[in-house]
Image (cartoon, rainbow, N blue to C red):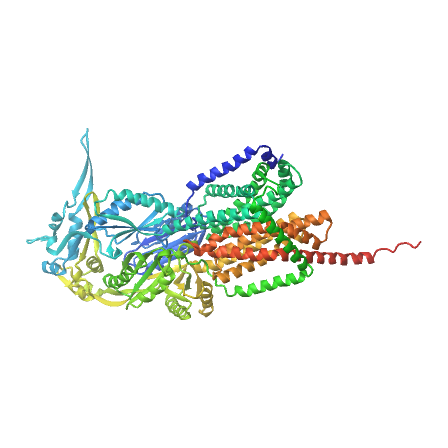
Amino acid sequence: MNITEICLRRPVFAWMIMCGTILFGILAISRIGVSQFPDVDNPTVSVNVSWPGASPEDVETSVVNQLEDAMSQVTGVLSLTGQARTGSGRVTATFDLSRNIDLALQDTQAKIAQIQRSLPQSALAPIVSKSNPDDQPIMTVGISGPFSRQLLADVARYQVQDMLQTVPGVGQIQTMGYLDRNIRIWVDAGKLVATGTTVTDVTAALQKQHVSMPGGQLDTGGLAFDVRVVGEVPDLPTMRNIVVRGGQTPVHLQDVALVEDGFVDVTSYARSNGEPVQGLGILKQPGSNAVAVAKAVRAALDKVQKTLPPGMKLEVIFDTTGFISESVNEIGLELGLAVLLTALVCWVFLGSISSTMNVLFAIPMSLLGTIAILYFSGFTLNTFTLLGLSLAVGLVVDDAVMVMENIFRHAEMGKDRVRAAGEGTKEITFAALAATIAVIAIFMPVAFMSGVIGKFFLQFGVTLSVAVAISYVEAITLAPARCAQMLRASHEARGVVGRLADRGFDSLSRAYAWALARSLRAPWLVLVAAFTVLALAGYVATFIKQEFVPSQDQSRLSVRLSAVVGASLDETDKLVRRAEEYLIKQPEVVDVMANVNAGGGNFFVTLVPPSERKSTQAELAAVWRKEMGTEPGLRVSVQDLSQQGFAGSRGWPVQFSVRGSDWDTLVALSKRLKELTAASGLVTDIESDYALGAPELVIAPDRARASDVGVTVQDIATTVSSLVGGVVVGQYSSGGRRMDIRLRLTRLQRGRPEDLRLLRIRTATGTQVPLSSVVTTKEQPELQEINHADRERAITITGNVAPGHAQSEALAFVQGFSTQLPPGYRAVLGGQSSQFGDAMSSLLFALLVGMLIAYMVLASQFNSFLHPVTVLTILPLSVAGAVFALFFAGKTLNVFSMIGLLLLMGIVKKNSIILVDYAIEVREGEKLDARQAMQRAGPIRLRPILMTAVATLMAAVPSALGLGPGAETRGPMADAVIGGLVLSTALSLFVVPAFYVVADDAKRRLARRADRPALANAPEPPVA
C-alpha cells in the first residue's frame, strides 16, 4: 500500500496533512526574519595598533608588515588589507564563508601574541576585533534640542549609547559630532615666559599634586582598615590653585593657564538639516538581521525618549532598513497577485470552480510548507527567497494539473471517482516525478557556486526546489484524495466558462493540428527557422548592456565632498555648508545628515518616495553632481547606496587597485590611470585612496647647539608635544564619571609656524632659551596613509558608471590597463568589479551542469539517449526569448536576469516532457510512426502545455510590471521569464515535434546502414 492509496482510503488524514503543513507555515511566517538579501557576511577580523608619533612609512615597515606576516598564517584567510597611517596601523583579514568567526578570532589572537614582542616598544598593545572597518551603519540616531552641548553629549554617551549597546544584534556604535568632556588647561606662552615657568613644570606639578592611590591595609586585630591616599583635587578652584613653581613668589596654575570644564578638541561637526546634532551610527553584528535590529533599536529609543528632559528630541535621522521592509512587503503583495492571476488562469482553462479549487489547494500547502522549511533552515524572507516563492506559484500547480487531468480522463472511461483517482495517479506518478526532478536538477549545481553570490543563489534554488518537491508530494497524495471527493467528470455539469473554454480549446486544437501536420511535412524548414531565431537572438544580445546589480531607487543617496589639501575644519565647513544649504532647499529632499571633517565631508540624503517626485534618484544625482561641483575648492561625488553591501562590496560599480613595490612609481601610475579613466567618459565620480595630507612642519633638534646649553631631545619633544599637540596629564572625577585633563597651548598662540618662537625651554643651568634656538624647522607635504592589498602596496581607484554606459564597458576598459603597466606592477579589479565576472561565470557553469543533470534524469525516464535531446532542444529557444524580452524592455543582463534564465531552464522542459512522453506512449500503444505520433500527441497535450505555461507566466507578470520598491531587481528576472516562456512555448509546439521526427528519421537511416553489411555478409540460402 503506497501513500496515494492511504490518502484515498483515509481522506481526512490527507486533509490533516495539508492543514498541518499550512499551520507550520503560518507559525514560521510570524517568526522568520526579514532582510533585503540573505544574511551572508564574510567573517572579518581586524587588528589595530596605535604607535603615537610614528610616520606612515615607519608604521608600514614596523607594524603592518609584521601583522600581515602573522595573519597570513591563519587558516581560511581569503584576503588581507592593510593601512598605515600617522600614529596607527590596521590589518583586516577576510575569511572563507565556512570559517567560524569566533575560532578565526582566537587563531588570530594567538598569532598576534607570538609576534607582539617584535613590535616597537612604544607601540600600544594590538587590539583584535571581529568587526569589518568597511561596514556602514544601518541607521543613524540624532539627539538635539535647546540644551548645552555638555548635557547633550552626556545624554548621547551615557543614556542613549549605553541603552543601544544592550539591544540584541547591535554591534559597534559610531559617534558623529560627539565630544567627550575634558578638563582643559589652556597654557599662555607669554605668562610662562613672564613667570619663568616651563610646560614641564606645569605637567610635573599636576602629576605630583593631583594623584590618588591605594595605601594598603591596617590590621588592628579585630578590624581591618583599607588605606587610600586621596590626593586628587575635588574641584576646579582647587586645581587652579595648584603650585606649579615654588619660591618666594609661588606660581599657581591659574597664573599661567586658563582652567575650564570643556571638551576634547573639535575634529568634526554633525548636523541634521542644518541644525547641530549628536549623531550615533549603529552597525549591526555580523550575521544579525538588519530589519530586526532596526525594529529593536526603535523600540529602545521610544523607552529612552520618555526619560529625557522636555524639549530634547531623540529621532532616527537616516535608516537604510526602511527600503528593505518596503521592498519585501512589495514582493509579498506581488506574491498575492501572482496567486490570484494563477487562480484566474486555472479557472479559465479548467472551466470549473471545483476543479480550480482542487488545483489551487496546492498553492498554500506548497508555499507555506516551503516557508516552514526556510525557517528551520535558518533562512530569511529576502529578495531571493520571496522571488523564488513568487515564481513558484506557477510551478506548484503543474503537477496537480497533470494528475487531475489524468484522473479526469480515467473518470470519462466510466470509472468511479475513487478508482479513477487511484489508477490515474498511479499512471502519471513516474512522469510527474521525472518532471519534478528535471526542474530541481537545474538548481542542484547552485550548491557548488562559491562565495557570497553562491550563498544568495543557494537560497533561491532551495526555495524553488522545496516548493516544487512539496507540490509533487501534494499532487500524488492530497490531489487524488480531493479528486475522489470533489471531481466532476460530466461535461453537462460544467458552467458557462467551462463550456466556452472547451469550445475555444477545441477550435484552437483543430487549428494547431492543421498547422502541425503541415509543418511536419518539412520538419527541416522548422529547424532552420528555429536556428534563424537563435542567430538573431545572438546578434541582439550584443546590444544588451551588462552589469552586476541594477541600481535601485531607494530614495537614499550618499554625497561625498572633498576640499583642497590642507583645508582646516572651519574652512572645510564653510564649503560644506553651502552644499548643505543647496540640498536642504531641494523639494525632493526630506532630510540631510551632514558629517564634516577637516578636508572633507559626507551627506546622507533621504528623498521623498519616487511617487512624489518627477526625477529619478539617478537623475537627481547627476544634477547635484553638476551644481555642487561648481563650488570652487570642492570636489563632489554621489554614491548610489543600493550598490553598497551587495555581495560584500563597498558599493562602487568600478573599483580597481594598482599594485607594486615602489611607492613613488605607484603614485605616478595611479594618477595616469585615473586620468585615462576620466578621459574615457565611461566612469564618473572617480576617487583614489591616495592623498597627501595637510602640510607637515618637521621640527628637527640641532643636537650640537642643544648639547651646548644642556637641553635634551626629550625636553624638546615634550615641550612641542604638550603645547602644540596637547597631552593628557591626568584624570578628574565629577558626578561619578572620569574625564581626561588635557593641557595645550591657547589657540591664538599655535595657529602659525612662527608661533613656535614664543616657546621657551629650560637649560641645564636653569635659564630659559627660545625653542627656535635649538631646533630647525621645515615644511613639507604629509603622506596620509599607505595601503596594502594582499600584502602588496596598493592604491585603489573607485568610481560610478557614467550615464549611458554599462558596467561591462567600464570594466573592459579598466582590464586593458594591465598591458600598459611596467613589469612588477598590475591593475587588479576589486569589490563589485571582481565579483561581476566571477558571478557570470559561476552562473554559466550552473546552467551547463544543470542541463547535463537534466539530460541524465530524462535519459533515465525515457530509457533513451536520444529523447532527452529532443526535450532539451527548447532550452536555446527559451534563452532567445529572454534575450528579446530584455532588449525590448530596455533591461540589462545582470545577476537577477540570470536568475530568470536559470529558472527558464527548469520551466520550459516540462512542456517538452509532456509532449514527448505522450508521443512515445501513443507510438508504442498504437504502433504509429514518429510523425503520426506527434500529430496525435500535439493537439491532445496542447491544453495542459498552454495552461502550465500561462500559469507560470502570470506568476511573473506582477514582478514585470515594476510598480513598487525594488522593482529594478525583480523586473529583469520577470522579463526574462516571460519572454522565454512566450517564445519557447510558441515554438516548442512545432520545433520539438520537428526535431523528434528528424531525429527518428536519422535514427532509422543509421539503423538501415548498419543492417546492410550484415545482410551482405549473410550466407546465401541453399539451392533446391
Going by the image, does 104 lie left or right of 522? left
Q: Where is residue 963, by image quadrant?
A: bottom left
| Residue pictured at 58% horizontal, 58% vertical | 876
Instruction: Give the x, y percent position of residue 620.
Output: 35, 62
Q: Is residue 574 above or below residue 912?
A: below
Instruction: Give the x, y percent position of residue 803.
Output: 41, 65
Query: Farthest left residue?
Result: 248
- Residue 350 in view, yes or no: no
Q: Where is residue 1014, by image quadrant?
A: bottom right
Q: Nearer the viewer, residue 812 or 329?
A: 329
Q: Nearer the viewer, residue 434 or 364?
A: 364
| Residue pictured at 23% horizontal, 56% vertical | 266
- Residue 923 in view, yes or no: yes
Q: How many marks?
A: 0
The quadrant the N terminus occupies is: top right
Query: Farthest top residue?
Result: 222
Instruction: Give the x, y percent position of residue 675.
Output: 39, 70
| Residue pictured at 58% horizontal, 32% vertical | 10
Q: Nearer the viewer, residue 202 or 646?
A: 646
Going by the image, does 484 lie left or right of 743? right
Query: Farthest right residue?
Result: 1024
Instruction: Give the x, y percent position of residue 337.
Output: 47, 49
